[in-house]
Image (cartoon, rainbow, N blue to C red):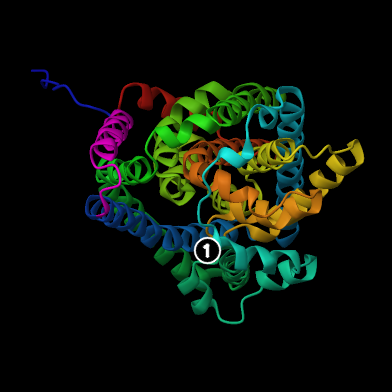
Amino acid sequence: MQKQRFFRVSLGWQIIIGLILGIILGQIFYQNKAAIQVMQNIGTMFISMIQMIVLPIVISCLTVGIANMGDIKKLGRIGLKTLIYFEIMTTLAIIIGIIVANVTHPGTYIDIHSLKGSDISQYTATAKTAKHSGIWSILMSIIPTNIFASLGKGDMLPIIFFSVLFGLGTASIGKQGKIITDTLNAVANVMFKVTNWVMRLAPIGVCALIGVTVGEMGFNSLKPLALFIVIAYATMAFFVFVVMAAVGHLFHVRFYEMFRIIENEVTLAFTTASSEAALPKMMEKMQKYGSSKGIVSFVIPTGYTFNLDGSAIYQSLAALFLAQAYNIHLTLGQQITLVVVLMLTSKGMAGVPGASFVVLLATVSTIGVPMQGLTFIAGIDRLVDMGRTAVNVVGNSLATVIIAKSEHEFDEDKREKYVASYKRGE
């Protein structure tokens, strides 16, 4: 006797329903401080639950993955490949953003003085620090003086550095290390199970976070900057479905199949504007899709720091948008300088709250744009952040598969079985 199958709404659709309800609630409670505070608290609690899961998963999976790899030369090769790939893709994203801004000229269609400014004081102190930080300070920040302090602050790079060393040390002690890997494997499995429980709350978290955004901004505040928002999203869509798809084809990656597998995580990242919200399930799915545990656990967390394609597109677009709005003509040399400055600054700011906006603050003064110009686009930063976060998630998934294939650590049989089971809804 066949089991009766009941109609079930997938997580992706639940999140979209949460998105729609959040927009409705935000409009109903527009400028209602009490309601906005309640929604903000609910959204913050959901993001906090995700952040609670992320670090145990990264540490356990990365340590076990590196221990299983056990070869420092191989790790160095993978690390170098990964960083070169990230640098090429983010530079390409910056260049595409600048080309689109030069072609469309979104800043010339707006009266910058008619816009209402927003408070950006929370970002300015960080941006001033960024201007004075060089490559040495970035490199020094990778090495933790106290790993527990880094865990407490959620600093991803020092945690990755420690986990890599701990994994190599575990591999070097032979059979004794098996106790550690077995324990950490069990920790990872437990945390993936907890992730599945937390994800059931995703529609509520999404509803609250979107409600806050709409409740604070309203739709009227978007009208003056609507063209910039549309151009930003169109550029991001082009980068994902044309540029990334072409890069995937070059490395024999079934890009659209992979995108279909991660669509729920992309939707979650988009609606929460948080890459961390998607990280636990991304790591789980990329392993099931065929990439080896070592590659997944190294590339994805590193990518969340160094491979921010969506953020790179937004930063270059926004910088030229503001220059055009202030009638500042940038020569080809100045635009090339802007590309270099964005490449360096964005790496130094990775992991900082509101990183994309902080990068802009640290960068626009180099092209003569007044600091107050950023107050005019601060109001829509959250809205554009949703798109750039989704692009970052897709970019890191593609990077994982490409690096796995380049190391011959991608299991095609495993991929076929997982895709078949995913289509059946298992």
* Residue at the spot 75% in from the left edge and 34% down from the top edge: 98
Residue 291: quarter of image:
top right
Q: Nearer the viewer, residue 31 or 411?
A: 31
Graded by Cα atoms within 10 Å as few (under 14), some (14 to 19) or many (20 or more), the crowding at tag 1 reads few
Compared to 344, does 331 lie above or below? above
Residue 340 image position (x, y, % from top left): 82, 48
* Residue at the spot 54% in from the left edge and 77% down from the top edge: 147
Q: Is residue 409 visible?
A: no
Predominant SS along the magenta part: helix
Residue 47 is inside the magenta segment: no
Q: Is residue 368 visible?
A: yes
Residue 23 is inside the magenta segment: yes
Residue 417 image position (x, y, % from top left): 43, 27
Residue 49: quarter of image:
bottom left
Q: Residue furthest top?
A: 1
Query: The magenta stretch spans which residues?
Result: 11-33
In the visual, does 304 lie left or right of 211? right
The residue beneath circle 1 is 122
Which amino acid, by three-letter code, is at mark 1?
Gln
In the visual, does 417 lie left or right of 199? right
Q: Nearer the viewer, residue 306 or 73?
A: 306
